[in-house]
Image (spheres, rainbow, N blue to C red):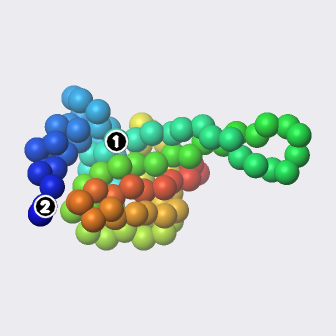
Amino acid sequence: MALPLADDLTNILNVDEFATAVTYNGGSINGVFDNETVPVETGGYVSVHEEQPRLTCRTTDLPIIAYNQPMIINAVTYYVRAWIHDGTGVTVIQLEKS
């Protein structure tokens, strides 16, 4: 049984709600961008943290996606490092700032 996500995604990916407009592949898509700072184990005694930028969007908005493609989000260029299609029509893209 398919999950009724279409209406929820429309609301979530609305730039007046939670989403941000992203320049990608010569066009624009909407996605929820977050840039969580997480601790990284470096084997030392000093606590180190790094940003983990990612974008959550509709899978159908990404007919072509490849490693190292640029995405401009909030006037900052990020590059695609990995992506996961979750099977429900949503894709999470792991990014790296240029």
- Viewer-closest of 36 and 2: 2
- Rendered residue at 33%/58% (across/down): 91
- For label 2, the residue is 2
| Left or right for 41, reference 82 | right
Q: Nearer the viewer, residue 25 or 2?
A: 2
- Residue at (42%, 37%) from the top-left corner? 74
Question: Which is in the foreground here, disc 1 or disc 2?
Answer: 2
Q: Residue furthest top?
A: 16
Task: Report, in whole angstroms, how far the alpha carbon at label 1 lies from the one at label 2.
Answer: 22 Å
Q: Residue furthest front?
A: 1
Left or right, residue 53 beside residue 6:
right
Q: Position of residue 24 (x, y in %)?
A: 34, 56
- From this view, report whether residue 89 is shown above or below residue 4: below
- Numbered mark located on residue 32 in the image: 1
> How crowded is the residue under tag 2: few (<14 C-alpha within 10 Å), some, or many (20+)?
few
- Left or right of 38 on screen, residue 93: left
Picture residue at 62% right of the left edge, 40% below the top: 38
Where is residue 36 drawn, in percent x and y?
A: 54, 38
Residue 5 in picture, x, y percent from top left: 16, 50
